[in-house]
Amino acid sequence: MYPGDHGNHEEELDALFRAYREACPDREPGVNFMPGVWQRIEAQQRNTFSFLHMAQAFATAAVAATLALGVYLYLPQNSSARAGAYQQNYLEALADANSVETPDIVGPLRLDLRQSANQPGR
């Protein structure tokens, strides 16, 4: 901007503002202006699917399920059965599985295929 052209730019700017006012006149809002705006906003909110609401509902359900599971696991339930399962060590469990009272029938089965093939009718 040059000091001598300062007045010329102001006149051009004033002319631009006058043209804008003529092209876009001020509207006087009526009595139903704000209620009409709110009706359009509410209609648009009702008609649009909001992913945010679904995500919030899912997050709330996940938090509730986590809390419920945490409370369930924290409370002692049938603690005597749970404690009995872990009171044996590994060697005691092996000894119980291979005790003397275990019958031999439970042992492994061996099948001799050579004898079965030599006997007719079997």
Image: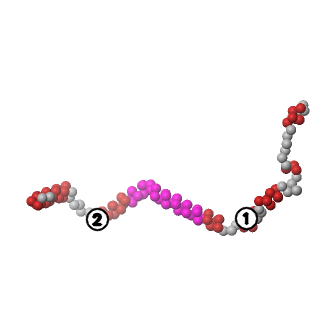
Residue at the image point whose x is 10% and y is 58% from the top: 5
Q: Report whether 68 appears left or right of 37.
A: right
Q: Which residues are magenta?
A: 42-68
Q: Position of residue 68 (x, y in %)?
A: 60, 65
> Residue at the location (58% across, 65% down)?
67
Say which quadrant the C terminus sits in.
Answer: top right
Tag 2 secondary structure: loop
Task: In the displayed orientation, state which residue is furthest to the left.
Answer: 4
Q: Where residue 82 is drawn, which disc sits there?
A: 1
Q: Nearer the viewer, residue 68 or 113?
A: 113
In primary-sequence order, the first of circles 2 and 1 is 2
**Where residue 100 sits: x, y (%)?**
88, 56
Q: Amino acid at mark 2?
A: Val
Query: Residue at label 2?
Result: 31
Relative image position of residue 72 (x, y in whole percent) = 64, 65
Q: CA distance from mark 2 to mark 1?
A: 74 Å
